[in-house]
Image (cartoon, rainbow, N blue to C red):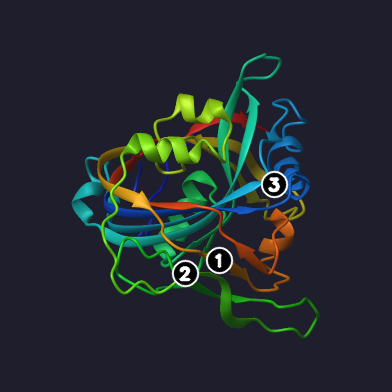
Amino acid sequence: MKQRYASLPGDIVGLPPYVAKDCLMHAMFVKGDTKNQQRLCDLALNEPTDNAFAFSVMTSWVLVTSIYVESMGSGDPLDKSKGVVSEVDIGLWSLVSGLEKPKSKKRKLYWLPSYLFVDSSAAMAAGREVFGYPKSVGEIVRKSTSPMNASVDVDIWHFRKFSPTERPVKETIMKVSGPPRKNETHDISSIEEISTFLAEFLPAAAARQYKIPLPDAGMPQIMLQQIRDAETPHFAALKEIICVSPKPKNISNGGFLKGQYSLELAKSASHPVAETLGLKKNNKVLGGIWLEYDFDVGLGRKIWSS
């Protein structure tokens, strides 16, 4: 039986739903490896559920998103009076499909996050505690305030290698770099054009089902939510598969990222981004967009629990 949550003094996690306003998203694709991503999919989704939903990776393309939120707050009648914060989320996502329910013939598309880097402890705590997002705190440095420039560095504390005496170092774990543009112009594209562009990288079903088939722009996200057991730490006290479907609103502007961008990844034992997704140290970005909009993050949907 569920017990009522005890919100203690100093709790930094507001109640969902969450309301995000004045947001900028950069979304771009890099070529990964399906086998590497499937290993993550199996570990996060198939092994806990004994393959009941038969989750599978749909494409080798890895989606890289940078989301800059000017105002993020709770939509709960009480918690919305407590205030709002700004937030930055840098994420890497794999497109997966799974049965809508065990033994069903219908399949559904989801975005599975592998790594999410945020700029505040509140964003990390809310993401991990409420939904199971694999968030880590880092220092995120934009190279330009222009919405058409997607260049950004993500600096975190990480272990370059593991050993009994090894200590973490702070350095750039990932870097998105693009060409300097002295005369940037608003090359505005319609939402239909953006959806057509995305369809080049994603299955046609995604483009048909979702106006903009991106995380935080309408397409469902799926996560493994688990809490380690304190008495038997090799086991989980809680293990669930959670689906979240953010809803975009007020799409005001957008366009294509101009010029050639690249994604550079550091070697890391604690955060092996390249190995997890089948990426290289230096990766060519093959297409990207920018979007200005608002979005809501509603309640999660539990599709499986142990």
Specify whether 16 is left or right of 269.
Answer: left
Task: Answer few, some or many: residues within 10 Å of disc 3's Cα (few below 14, many 20 plus, some between 14 and 19).
Answer: some
Give whichever of discs 1 and 2 has the lower sequence position. Answer: 2
Percent x, y for residue 173?
Answer: 59, 72
Specify whether 13 is left or right of 125.
Answer: left
Please give the count of numbered marks on the rendered protein.
3
Label 1 with label 2: CB-CB less than 8 Å: yes
Q: Which of 213 and 254 is in front in this view?
A: 254
Percent x, y for residue 213?
Answer: 46, 36
Q: Is mark 2 on a helix, strand or loop?
A: loop
Q: Which of 100 and 229 is in front in this view?
A: 100
Please name the residue that numbered disc 2 is placed on: 178
Residue 50, quarter of the rendered image: top right
Q: Is mark 1 on a helix, strand or loop?
A: strand
**Vertical placement of 115 versus 235: above or below?**
below
Q: Residue at x 55, y 28 (%)?
A: 204
Q: Residue furthest left?
A: 81
**For the residues marked 3 and 2, what is the alpha-carbon distance in whole angstroms?**
42 Å
Please name the residue that numbered disc 3 is placed on: 236
Please name the residue that numbered disc 1 is placed on: 262
- Does residue 53 appear in the picture of this structure? yes
Task: Answer few, some or many: residues within 10 Å of disc 2's Cα (few below 14, many 20 plus, some between 14 and 19).
Answer: some
Amino acid type of the residue that numbered disc 1 sits on in the rendered structure: Ser
**Vertical placement of 70 versus 81: above or below?**
below
Amino acid type of the residue that numbered disc 3 sits on in the rendered structure: Ala
